[in-house]
Image (tube, grey):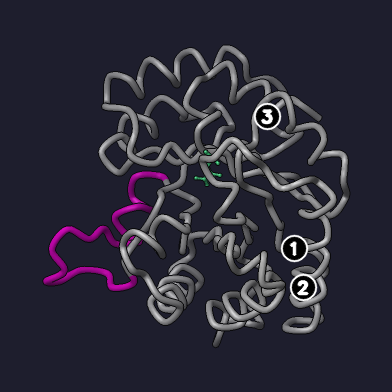
Amino acid sequence: MRRLIAANWKMNKTVSETEDYIKKFLKFVEHPESREILICPPFTSLYVASKLLQGSGVKLGAQNCFYKDSGAYTGEISIPMLKELGCEYVIVGHSERRHIFGENDELINKKVVACVEKGIRPILCVGEKKEEREAGLTFKVVETQIRLALSGVEEHTDKIDIAYEPVWAIGTGIPATPEDAVEVHTFIRNLLNELNPKNQRKTRILYGGSVKPENAAEFMKHEAINGLLVGTASLDPESFAKIVYSF
Ligand code: PEP
């Protein structure tokens, strides 16, 4: 399994800032075949990013999508629109979408199903809030989110990646310990094996939450951690490159 290191820029970088970043980042890229490198800029930067990344081996993804192809859905972006721009991945169900924009498991499931049907690889984000961890509900929350999000596409989990992102670790500077992450990743792997015994580890399980150049290797030395989803520390090209080549 080729491990996946993904940058989630969130609502950061204009088109000119994107150009600047990608030109700098590509200078650090070597052996792109040894690991999968993914950049997910805002929608407005996808076109220019796609042009600049052409032929580099670095993949392009979006941070969200809608499940319909076209129509009266003001402000939404469809999967065919993303695919035309060269996106191979889309982040679905990020905790900021769930908790700031009110996305629920039903909507997230429709998006995951649409991604599988239309041939773009979703990175499904799951994770518990601080109070849920403190109440001992981590496994229950993660299990429920995964079962609901994958409902109807259990046989196609080989076309999906999952990011375990504890909400309390996102953007706080306080990551989960690698041991805590491994515990949840192992739980998710067992759940995936139950949902689709034929999957054979084709779904990568990424860790996300305050990953930085200083701690990335600690996560990546564990076999259960198949990649990283990086927010804040991906905004600087050198910092993201250090994470990409930390293992
Ligand atoms: C994220 O937004 O997916 C994320 C993990 O953010 P950060 O790295 O800033 O915690």
Q: Is residue 71 magenta?
A: yes
Residue ID at (76%, 54%): 181
Q: Measure how far apart labels 2 and 3 are at the Cα level.
A: 26 Å
* Image mark for residue 202: 1
User: Is ligand 1 closer than 8 angstroms to the Cβ of mark 1?
Assistant: no
Neighbours of disc 3 within 10 Å: few (<14), some (14-19), many (20+): many
Q: Amino acid at mark 2?
A: Asn
Q: Which residue is mark 3?
A: 244
Determine if the magenta segment contains residue 40. Answer: no
Is the distance from the Cβ of mark 2 to the nearest ligand 1 atom less than 8 Å? no
The residue under label 2 is 199
Proximity of marks 1 and 2: CB atoms separated by less than 8 Å: yes
> Disc 2 on helix, strand or loop?
loop
For the C terminus, the image quarter is top right
Q: CA distance from mark 3 to mark 1?
A: 20 Å
- The answer to which of marks 3 and 1 sits earlier in the sequence is 1
Q: Which residues are magenta?
A: 67-86
Q: Position of residue 236 (x, y in %)?
A: 50, 20
Task: Residue 65: give its label.
Answer: none
Across and down, in percent, residue 124 comes to 55, 63
